[in-house]
Each structure stands twice: as C-alpha cells, then as structure tokens.
Image (tube, coloured by chain):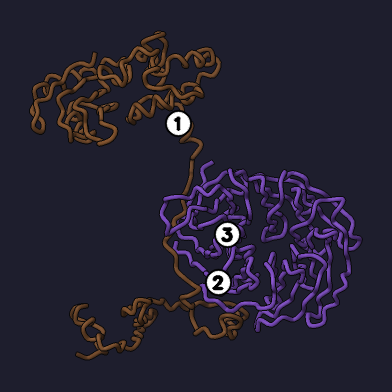
C-alpha cells in the first residue's frame, strides 16, 4: 500500500482522530497548531491558530461541526470546523490532558493535570450553545489525591458515565450525575497512554506503558483480552469491521535509539496488528521514524492512520493482502 | 527551437536553450482521469529543475455532508493553498507492505525440534579433547559448568551450544564468545587448557570431525568464496576456515574444510591434492 505522509507539524504528534464519517483526519501535536486533513487524498483543509502550548488531546463532534482541543497552555478551546475560528476558550488552572465530546455532543468531559498544588480533576461542561459556553462545569470531581492523575477520558455510549485512564494504570468509571466512582479496573501496571472505544461502543481498548494493550467490556469494566508486545504501547484501536476482520492495531515503541543503518527511507517503527479474539500478532507495518504515538482505524475499516514521534502522520489504505489474509487457528 | 515543445530530442539541447535564464512555462496535461503537471524552477544552486507531478483524478460518490465539507475554504496555514494536495505537506510515501507473521509459533516449534534432532544426532560426534565430553574443546575448562546443568535443562543448554555448530564464522570470535559466556575473557594462549603454541597452525578449533580436510599452499589472495567454489562439487560443506592475516586479510596459505560426509572429504583429497590453483600447487590431506 502507498501511504500518504502528512507533514504539517513541527513536533511530535500527540493524537490523531478521524471524524465519524471518516473523510476528515485531525492531528494534534506538541506544536500549538492542530491540523485537519482530508483523509482521501491527504489534502490539508486548515490549521487552528490560537493555542500557545502543546495540544494534548482533541475530539470532534458527531456531525463534524465542532472541534475541541485540550492544551498544555491550560486552556480548552472549541473551534468551528468549517472556518477554523475559535468559538470558546475555557481557562483552567492546570493543563488539560483529555477532552471528549459526549455521544450526543451536548457535553464535554475533560481532565486536567496535577500541577503546582492543584489536583487532577475531571469536569463536565455543557456546550449546547458553543458560542456561549458556561465555563462552570456541571460536574467536577477531584481525581487526586485518592487516585493517580487522570490522563484520558471517554464518555460511555449513552452519556451516563465517563471512563478515565490514569497514570498508575487503572481505569475508573464515574457516574455522570453524582460524580462518584462506579467501577475501577486495575489490570495495567503502568501509565495508560490511550483509550479508545470500539465502533459499537461496547468495548474499550487501553494502551499502556507496560507493553500491553487490554480489551475491556465497557458496561462492567471486565477485562476481556490482553495483547502483549515487547515495547511500551502508546495507542491502540479496534477495527470497525468487527465481524469480518476482528483486528486490533497497536502502536508504540520507545526503544533505545538503536535504529541505525536500516534504510532511511522508511523507518523501523511499526504498527502491529493482532487478532481481536486470539490475541495473536499477525502483521506489522513499518514506516515511522519514531515511536507511534497515536493510531486509529478509518471508520469504514478499510484503512488506518498513525501519528508518530517523528511528527509525520501516515494514512494507509489496506490492500488486498490484508483482506485475503486468513488467520489460521 | 520551440520552448513549448515538451517532447525534447535530448536533455543536452534543453540545457543549452535555457542558458539564457528564462524557464519554460508550466505545462499541464490532463487526459480523462489523470493529470500531469510539469513545472520548471530554479533550485538552490541556481540549476534548472524539472518537477513532474502525476495526479490521478478520482470520482467518489459520498454522502451529502461529506461532499459539502469538501467545498469548504481553507484556513489557517493552508489559507493560500491551491485546490488539491499541497506537495509541501502531503507526500506519497514509499510502498510499505504488511509483514504477515502467520503460524509464527508453529514455525518456531518446528525449528526447535529440528535443532534438537540435530543436536542429538551430533551427540556422539563431538568430543572435547581434554575431558572427552560432549562439547568443543576450545571452551572446555568452562564447559564443566554446563555438564550438571545439562541433565536438567536439556533443550536450553543444547540451544546454547548450538552456536559452535555450522556457523561458519571466524573461530577467533567464536572462542572469545565461548569464553565470554562464562564471564571472563580468555586469551588465545590460555584456551584449550593452554596446550597450544599461539593460534594453532595444526588444528583449526580442535574439531574432532573425521570429515575435515586441510588444504595448504594456497595463494595469498584466496578467499573463502574461492574455497567454497573449489570444494563444493565434492559434497556439502559444513564450514570453511581460512587462516587469514588479521591486518591485511590475506590468506596465510592454509585452510580447513569440514565436509558433511566423510566420503566427500575423501574424494576431495583424491582429486585436489596436487591440483594447480592460482599459481601454486595445492596440497590437500586429512586434518590430523
């Protein structure tokens, strides 16, 4: 397959995200300008100007009209996707680590960092009127000191609860109305780097620094599967084609810099594909020059995109070999 | 000398024409579903550069919302971008292929079985000169440690001893590794219980294989590949050791060839002893 290499960032990529329909690809990096691209041909639609620090996380509303970014400059901004203008700028006490639109797009959950005497918090704001966002959250809980700081956040499928991933490897489900902990999943031993939902919202996959990715049932937070690798996993995603191609892709790698004299045209860091059920690795795709920081399947399951420490976003479309591959069991 | 004529007779003509400093105009050819844009520009060294870009025009039927989004005006850093991908930001990377690892486990198991079989079959053949045990001499003083372990950790230990086998690397490195695995560097004179007179001339590594021949009177620019070509017709070779001068890499004049079968070795001796190779007459005999 001939991937598209998108070169719009000057620093390493922190997060990439497809919109629901799959035609737009958003990329955020440690430089303050997130980019948006057309995923079909890699054409850049635009960049969002306004942040002054690394953009840690992004999310897009289901209708692709609003785009939110959480940044290390202690603000969370809401943007209009069509024009690229900033609609709202919410200031926090510490850097914003995780942002997520609720399924209905009416609320945003975000987590802030534990810094300078402030605790890590999980808050929810109402954004039914994006031009006029009330900065006071409708729900706020202190994550620390009773738990490790929360880094990523995801809404449950019916907007009833929120799941957060923490620095010590546990994931916690919070009731949205009361702000109380509902369930805790403690299986990972090191920091959770990324959490993604499966396409149907029934399963959650977490990628952790402890070199594994785990699949959980979202309703009960019961651990279902473990995907083991030999290097820290920075991001993991579940293929939308769960029936025909039940695959999971993992991206990671923080090996010592022994990437020496291999061909310098394509990098050595690879995305690894595992079978969802059998937990067996069946394919690798090389290409990145640095560890992969974020990886995501295209919503139609026919391709995937990955963003790496090298600052490049690579968009791949699977060729026949992928579809014809039969996993022997 | 029409400048618009894209089909040129030779690049030499083209270069001559543009010496004046004016660049040919951009040529855009589109036919049906592909577009070829040929742009001329000056690169950093002031040299004329011709950039040919091929675009494929595809038509997709998409949902209305997606089509609407495609018509949006660009903003931010892309505000001044022309329609279509901007080559500064979008590049088609090299072809990458999915590297499938099917049946990895089975393959590994098979390999291990084969190794085990090899090792077991070789058990009797390998004999250390000093302790008559089942290993190569050069590592003997330290091999005792492995002996008691062997009974308990059969498979793993055999795998460790595997490297000395058909590897075909210079023996110097191997013995150092052998010594190294025990944790200490052993100088060449101290290896094998110290019975050698420096790097041995008489025997390559203390290998007690009956299918080994020694060939002497080789010319100094003989290489392993030459020996391979010379001895291969007689049968399978398990390894070739060519004594080389470390600094110059030239052959010291002798080599040891380990055949897999003794009869092949016998044949090689018969045929090649007295054979003229390069400018010297080879002497091929059993390695004592």
Count neighbours of disc 1 (C-alpha within 10 A) and say few if under 14, some if 14 to 19, many if 20 or more. Answer: few
Count neighbours of disc 2 (C-alpha within 10 A) and say few if under 14, some if 14 to 19, many if 20 or more. Answer: many
Q: Earlier in the sequence, mark 3 or mark 2?
A: 2
Residue located 34% across and 76% down the image: B45
Label 2 resides on the chain identified as: A
Q: Are marks 3 and 2 on the same chain?
A: yes
Residue located 63% across and 54% down the image: A234
Kindly state the secondary structure of the residue where label 1 is placed. helix
Disc assigned to residue B110: 1
Disc assigned to residue A309: 3
Quadrant in which the C terminus of chain A is drawn: top right
Mark 1 to mark 3: distance in Å? 38 Å
- Residue B10 higher or lower than A17, as above or below: below
The chain displayed brown equals B
Residue at mark 2: A8
Residue found at the far right of this picture: A178
In this view, the residue in front, A257 or A26, is A257
- Residue B112 higher or lower than B124, as above or below: below
Residue A229, image x, y percentages:
59, 44
Q: Does residue B167 show up?
A: yes
In this view, the residue in front, B232 or B41, is B41
Chain A: give its colour.
purple
Mark 2 to mark 1: distance in Å? 47 Å
- Residue B75 higher or lower than B194, as above or below: below
* Quarter of the figure with residue B62: bottom right
Residue B12, image x, y percentages:
19, 78
- Residue B51 higher or lower than A265, as above or below: below
Residue B286, image x, y percentages:
20, 16
Quadrant in which the N terminus of chain A is drawn: bottom left
Q: Nearer the viewer, mark 1 or mark 3?
A: 3
Count neighbours of disc 3 (C-alpha within 10 A) and say few if under 14, some if 14 to 19, many if 20 or more. Answer: many
């Amino acid at each position: 397959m001939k991937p598209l290499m998108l070169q719009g960032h000057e620093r390493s990529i922190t997060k990439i995200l497809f919109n629901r329909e799959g035609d737009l690809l958003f990329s955020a990096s440690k430089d303050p300008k997130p980019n948006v691209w057309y995923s079909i041909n890699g054409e850049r639609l635009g960049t969002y100007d306004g942040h002054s620090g690394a953009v840690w996380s992004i999310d897009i509303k289901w209708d692709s009209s609003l785009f939110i970014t959480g940044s290390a400059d202690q603000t969370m901004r809401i943007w209009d996707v069509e024009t690229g203008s900033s609609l709202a700028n919410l200031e926090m006490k510490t850097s914003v680590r995780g942002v997520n639109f609720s399924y209905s797009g009416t609320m945003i959950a975000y987590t802030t960092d534990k810094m300078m005497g402030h605790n890590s918090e999980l808050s929810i704001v109402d954004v039914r009127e994006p031009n006029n966002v009330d900065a006071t959250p409708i729900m706020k809980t202190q994550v620390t000191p009773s738990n490790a700081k929360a880094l990523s956040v995801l809404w449950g499928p019916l907007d009833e609860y929120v799941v957060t991933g923490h620095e010590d490897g546990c994931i916690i489900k919070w009731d949205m109305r009361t702000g109380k902990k509902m369930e805790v999943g403690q299986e990972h031993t090191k920091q959770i780097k990324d959490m993604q939902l499966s396409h149907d919202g029934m399963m959650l996959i977490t990628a952790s620094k402890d070199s594994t990715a785990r699949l959980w049932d979202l309703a009960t937070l019961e651990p279902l599967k473990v995907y083991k690798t030999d290097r820290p996993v920075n991001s993991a995603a579940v293929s939308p084609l769960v029936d025909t191609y039940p695959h999971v892709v993992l991206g990671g790698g923080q090996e010592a810099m022994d990437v020496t004299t291999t061909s310098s045209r394509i990098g050595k860091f690879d995305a690894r594909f595992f079978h969802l059920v059998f937990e067996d690795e069946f394919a690798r795709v090389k290409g990145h020059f640095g560890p992969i920081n974020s990886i995501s399947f295209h919503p139609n399951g026919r391709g995937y995109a990955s963003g790496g420490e090298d600052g490049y976003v690579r968009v791949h479309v699977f060729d026949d070999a992928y579809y014809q591959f039969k996993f022997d069991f | 000398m029409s400048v618009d004529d894209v089909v040129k007779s030779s690049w030499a003509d083209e270069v001559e024409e543009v010496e004046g400093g004016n660049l040919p105009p951009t040529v855009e050819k589109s036919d049906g579903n592909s577009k070829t844009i040929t742009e001329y520009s000056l690169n950093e060294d002031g040299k004329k550069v011709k950039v040919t870009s091929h675009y494929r025009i595809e038509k997709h039927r998409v949902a209305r919302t997606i089509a609407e989004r495609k018509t949006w005006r660009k903003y931010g850093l892309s505000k001044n971008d022309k329609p279509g991908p901007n080559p500064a930001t979008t590049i088609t990377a090299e072809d990458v292929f999915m590297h499938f690892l099917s049946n990895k486990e089975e393959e590994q198991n098979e390999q291990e079985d084969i190794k085990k079989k090899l090792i077991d079959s070789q058990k009797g053949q390998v004999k250390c000169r000093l302790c008559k045990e089942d290993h190569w001499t050069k590592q003997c003083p330290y091999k005792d440690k492995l002996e008691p372990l062997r009974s308990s950790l059969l498979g793993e230990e055999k795998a460790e001893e595997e490297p000395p086998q058909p590897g075909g690397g210079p023996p110097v490195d191997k013995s150092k590794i052998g010594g190294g695995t025990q944790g200490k560097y052993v100088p060449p004179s101290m290896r094998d219980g110290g019975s050698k007179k420096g790097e041995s001339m008489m025997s390559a590594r203390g290998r007690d294989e009956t299918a080994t021949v020694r060939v002497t009177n080789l010319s100094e620019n003989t290489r392993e590949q030459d020996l391979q070509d010379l001895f291969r017709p007689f049968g399978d070779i398990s390894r070739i050791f060519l004594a080389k001068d470390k600094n110059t890499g030239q052959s010291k004049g002798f080599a040891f060839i380990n055949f897999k079968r003794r009869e092949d070795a016998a044949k090689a001796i018969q045929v090649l002893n007295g054979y003229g190779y390069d400018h010297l007459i080879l002497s091929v005999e059993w390695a004592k």
